[in-house]
Image (spheres, rainbow, N blue to C red):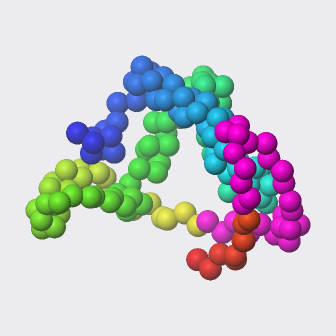
Amino acid sequence: MFAQFFICPLFSQNSVEKEMKAVDSEFRNALQSDADRYFQLYQHESNPDNVFNRFINGSIETLKKEGIVSELKEFHAKWYSSNLMKLCIYSNKDLDDMETIVRDLFAQVENKNIEVPSFSDPPAFTPEHLGKFYRVKSVCDENELGISFNYPWYG
């Protein structure tokens, strides 16, 4: 069942390699998507001190490294806690019935009472990152004009 992924994931070498191939496939498909390429440019041109500027997609080259299974297990042990998770369910069933089902399925997700991390990065876009014009060659042979307005984050 889906909940077992959060409760007790397998982390077998085979399943990790299978997921790495799926991530790599998404990465390869993104290379042929104008929307993904625009987003990568937007991300690349953002403030390098902000998390937005970092990793977006993985590939076999970035993921296939010695000890990846151990790193996944460490990450799971450190961060997979019910107090940090949210779950969204979409169903045509009665709300009370769904709540009972979900509580039964996910009750075993451990609550480690991990402190919610603070994300106090500097702004994704500072004045030197704004007011720029880019011409991007479409891989889909389309003409498009995109204009972005950046507003400060009030979180």
Spot occupied by residue 79 in the image (x, y as percentages of width and height):
46, 51
Image: magenta residue range: 119-146
Location of residue 116 with respect to 81 vertically, above or below: below
Q: Is residue 33 visible?
A: yes
Q: Is residue 30 magenta?
A: no
Count of numbered tags:
0
Dominant secondary-structure state across the stretch colored magenta: loop
Find the residue positioned furthest to the top. 14
- Classify residue 9 as left or right of residue 91: right
Q: Is residue 48 visible?
A: no
Location of residue 41 with respect to 26 vertically, above or below: below
- Classify residue 137 as left or right of residue 119: right
Location of residue 35 with respect to 73 vertically, above or below: below
Spot occupied by residue 25 in the image (x, y as percentages of width and height):
54, 29
| Residue at left offset 80%, top offset 47% | 136
Q: Quadrant of the N terminus?
A: top left
Q: Is residue 135 magenta?
A: yes
| Residue at left offset 79%, top offset 60% | 47
Spot occupied by residue 115 in the image (x, y as percentages of width and height):
48, 64
Nearer to us in this view, 22 or 2: 22
Nearer to us in this view, 53 or 118: 53
- Classify residue 23 as left or right of residue 28: left
Q: Specify the quadrant of the image occupied by residue 130.
A: bottom right
Nearer to us in this view, 120 or 131: 131
Find the residue positioned furthest to the bottom. 154
Nearer to us in this view, 87 or 143: 143
- Classify residue 24 as left or right of residue 141: left
Spot occupied by residue 63 in the image (x, y as percentages of width and height):
60, 29
| Residue at left offset 37%, top offset 61% | 86
Q: Specify the quadrant of the image occupied by residue 155.
A: bottom right
